[in-house]
Amino acid sequence: MADLVDEGSFVEYGRFVTAAQEQRRGREAVITETPADGLVGGLARVNGALFGDRSRCAVLSYDYLVMAGTQGMRGHRKSDRLIGLVERLRLPAVFFTEGGGGRPGDTDIPLVSALDVPSFALWARLAGVVPRIAVVSGRCFAGNAVLAGSSDLVVATRNSNLGMAGPAMIAGGGLGDHAPEEIGPVSVQTRNGVVDVEVADEAEAVAVTRTLLGYFQGALPPGEAPDQAALRTVVPERERQAFDVRVVVDTLADVGTVTHLRAAFAPEMVTALGRIEGRSVGFVANQSMRMAGAITAEAADKAADFLELCSTHGIPVVSLVDTPGMMVGPEAETTGLVRRASRLVVAGARLRVPLVGVVLRRGYGLGAQAMLGGSTHEPLLTVAWPVAHLGAMGLEGAVRLAMRSELDAIADAAQRERRVRELTAALREEASALNAARHFEIDDVIDPADTRSTIAAALGF
């Protein structure tokens, strides 16, 4: 906490609170052994030199040295008090959530179920009100994990574990004996999308958290721009050759300002926060290096969550489109694709912030529409690079569907495939970005090197 907050800015709440176990342990013991009831919290500034009055925030941390960071009843009262201040003052909040969950044995307070604790509802109710970042290191189980999982962003150290129950609860449920290290390791929680950013250690966690807070705190002076001419050659000449769209994101953003979120989860979709001309921007992009950039159910969830985050907290979005469309087929439908892909359309249509769409190469079908908020004219601006093509579906597939009768009439297989290539080439010309712009289906076709300046101008930066 001291590493995170500006020096001298921390105002602590409830520093003299002790665990409600005086009847069991005696007064001296609880004073000595349960300082702050295992929860340190207060108000502070983070990034004050950069953002002035907008740097105020709440910071809370469970103390693993006090009964393994478990949640005591008085500790809950402290967190409830601070969460109430967060809501009243509309402050961002950072919560270091390491700990073992609910604590039995607080005998000074009459309890039966201990289920009438408002902490979880109060913290969850802040969703959409203020940005909340959870930092997970070490072991984070049960109630502590719920606070982390209810946050907007989760930063976790490589050696941490995050789970809805710890070893004792799992064993008590008759589900076997497990070491803490086996339960929800970060290697699992990054792949399934629980963790947004994985870091090496707590020092890096603090640095990343400070950066993440900054995106919500306001604008900075314009940063250094990478060489934009590099964007002219980033798309391969061969249409079916993949390229790393993260290069495009990093080139569009101010140098050193990009933080990728949920990178190991649904890597066919890239989500990142960064800055253009010092202003915070969200990037959502199709990654052709995975599943050819098709939108899977998990990718749709990832993008929808990200759009909701940006929309809620006033961060404009840049959508980089290079997709053959939604993933299709019997196996894809077993993932709940219809409902989850449609959720992305809903999230885009409900955006309350400006959206700028850039079609890099392929913008096909409902997948492209979903990336553009529902249609090519839903964004504030939709542009394409000169190599881009747009269509209701993949071009070869469109030919085989629309021209099925003609193709079936060609008996020779080789001749039939030659005809498919001829018709596809003709359709490619029809589907070019320039032709789409001629019909005003998109707003402009631009030099890739002008993309950053076009985005900045459209967003008023």
Image (cartoon, helix red, strand yellow):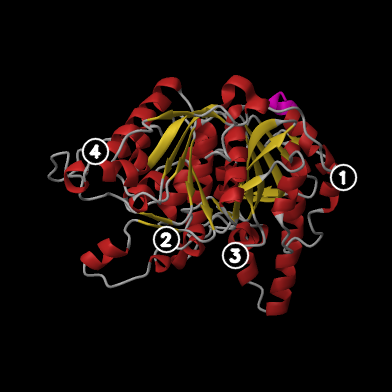
Mark 2 / mark 1, whichever is N-terminal:
1
- Please give the label number shown on residue 117: 4
Asked if the residues shown at circle 2 and circle 1 are in contact, with their CB atoms under 8 angstroms apart, the answer is no
**Residue 214 relative to residue 170: left or right:** right
Crowd band around label 1 with a 10 angstrom C-alpha radius: few (<14), some (14–19), many (20+): few
**Residue on which the image places disc 3:** 404
User: How far apart are the two marked residues, 3 and 2, measured between alpha carbons?
Assistant: 30 Å
Q: Residue at point 35% right, 33% down? A: 16
**Residue occupying image coordinates x 29% and y 33%:** 77
Residue located beneath label 2 in the image: 335
Which of the two labelled residues, at mark 2 and mark 4, occupies the earlier sequence position? Answer: 4
Circle 2 SS class: loop
Residue at the image point whose x is 60% and y is 31% from the top: 7
**What kind of element bears circle 4?**
loop
For discs 3 and 1, the disc positioned in front in the rendered view: 1
Q: Which mark is residue 208?
A: none
Q: Which residue is mark 1?
A: 229
Q: Decide which of 400, 298 is in the foreground and name it.
A: 298
Give above or below for 444 relative to 197: above
Look at label 3 and name its amino acid. Answer: Arg
Q: Magenta span: helix, strand or loop, mainly?
A: helix
Residue at mark 4 to residue at mark 1: CA–CA distance: 57 Å
Question: SS for tag 1?
Answer: helix
Q: CA distance from mark 2 to mark 1?
A: 40 Å
Residue 278 in view here:
yes
Tell me the kind of residue under disc 4. Val
Q: Which stretch did the figure color magenta? A: 457-461
